[in-house]
Image (spheres, helix red, strand yellow):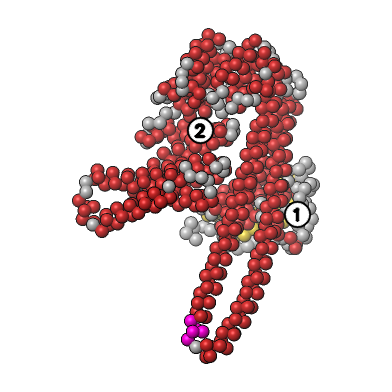
Amino acid sequence: MRPMYKLHQIVLATVLGLCAAFPAIAENNQPANETKDVKDQLVYYESVLKDLLTRPVTEDNDAHVETARENLKNAAREKGMPSYFYNAYQLSQEYYTRRGENYRAMLLMQEMQEVATGENDSYGIWLSARFLADMYIKQNDYVSAKPHLEEAIKVYNSSDNEEILKRSATRMYCDYADTYPIASDSVRINVKKAGEHAKTHLDTLRYQYNLLRLAALDDNQKEYERLKEICVGDPDFPRISPDAELFFSLIAATRDGSILDREEEIYKLSTVREMKVIANLCENKGYKDFAFNVEKKLVNLMETVISNTNHSRISELDVSMGKASLNAELVNKEHEISRISLFLSILLVIILLGITLFSFIHIRQLSRSKNKDKLQIEELKAANEKVRLANEAKTRFVQNMSHEVRTPLNAIVGFAQLLSLPEGVITSTEKDEYAGHIVNNSKMLTMLLDDILNASSMDKGDYKINYETGEKDFLCEAAISSSEHRLQPGVKLYYAPEEYTPHNFITDPRRVQQILINLLTNACKHTAQGEIKLSSSLAANPGYVTFTVTDTGTGVPPDKAEEIFERFAKLNEFVQGTGLGLSICRDIATRMDAKVFLDTDYPGPGARFVFMVPDKQNPQE
């Protein structure tokens, strides 16, 4: 395969060279021929990428895939054919999915979505939304898939792009219906829309299968049997539901009561959605305890899926960070070897010109080289020690995250199970309390994952600062509102500006608010009693809008003032968090030409953090 691949490259290079050598010939070609030549070139680049996807998975092949993808993207850009540009992303995503790197494939689709959104390309936005939704659905994560399906449907219904409109919307609406609770009217509305958009036989079959599930839930036996006969008799039906035979058998078992002896078979169905259909049917038939037990196990199953997914993302992130460090070290060593090789070559020439005349210089150079090597050894030892400490920090980070993520997940699942108890077991007051716990733990889980994704975005260099007008008091009050739920009982949180007049300035309001929320959240975690005060000042540091967060908590030793801004740094391992919050604050502030630091002169009790933002009045400043 590899020799043929190189032969194709040689042939293509020859053709392109001839076109460049004879511009007159190229100018005399008809537009139709030019279009065909352009498409042939793009088809060639696409075929190279497709060929690489069929090869064994190796690190060497990874590099070839990356190169082939960039070649296809660049050629598509140059020739103005965006469909091939997005195909490069799609094919690469299939490659990483095949090798089990789902998180890497997802990041690639998110990159594609960001590019398409930045260029307002409806086809790219629609295609990336569909792929992201499919990835989440394959993991039975319909909650995460829902916003991407909504985006895809919105673009489909508002676009006049032929590439989009020639596709069918039936599967989108069927998948979107599955994101709602089974008994919701939204399920029936979207299934109906799926039927209205059917374009192919497979679309109609998928629509009929969804109608079959609704007929089963409605206990409409006649309609159910009619649709079942249609589906079972169609040779394409296994593509819609590979577990149809087991699914139909379990539906029949709910009617004769034998389902009570076949619980374990329910969990052999390929999708959680079909399991929930069976559980709902059991509840409708009066097997409430059995249905409750099935639902409880499905909740545990989803907890395991989400936990494994998060662990996979953390592991892949850890591997990615490790590879980046290793590559940087290898590049440095290659440069060092090149410099030493050049030095030895020059030294050899000098020796050949005159050993007697330059013997003293030669000895002196050897001495310098020895000292230089000694210094390099010391530097390498120091670098190795840094790598070792970084690896230990990452290991602690993964261990902490396993605990941090599981804690809110367990709380969410536990209180959700309590809320699903039959009526009368718990009071409405208790229900409100449990719902509040679920919301708080969901926000905590979101904050943990946002910290990881923000850190990853900064490492990739795609974290953007968007300047616009912001108002200091509004930013502070919004940050207070977003942080109040993190307060510990009895602690007071309030805003006290030095100047009570509104003040507008040019900055990135979203990033300023993000830093203020992080500082307030950090104060909430470390303040068990007393108060937390957010203040703003225009006079404290001329040329800057100065924000301060002062608390009466545990405080920070002055000698740790810089250490706490390092990644994964936690002075108290028993306080919840990733150890990324303050590091992210420092990184964002640096990108905005702002400053964030601990006020080591603050006498206490507690700590005071200072955030200074340039007071720009002109966007060009």
Distance of label 2 from label 1 (alpha carbons): 42 Å
Specify which label sits upstream in the sequence, 2 or 1.
Answer: 2
Q: Quadrant of residue 419?
A: top right
Q: Which residues are magenta?
A: 349-353
Q: Is residue 9 left or right of residue 142?
A: left
**Tag shown at residue 571:** 1
The answer to whether residue 287 of the structure is visible from this angle is yes
Residue 113 visible in rendering: no
**Residue at image x 45%, y 38%?**
127
Q: Would you name the residue on which mark 2 appears?
A: 149
Secondary structure mainly formed by the magenta segment: helix
The residue sitting at 63% across, 25% down in the picture is 268
Q: Label 1 neighbourhood size at 10 Å, few (<14), some (14-19), many (20+)?
A: few
The single residue placed furthest to the bottom in the displayed view is 357
Would residue 255 appear left or right of 505 to someone viewing this image? Answer: right
- Residue type at numbered disc 1: Leu
Coordinates of residue 336 in the picture (x, y in percent): 56, 69
Marks 2 and 1 in Cβ contact (< 8 Å): no
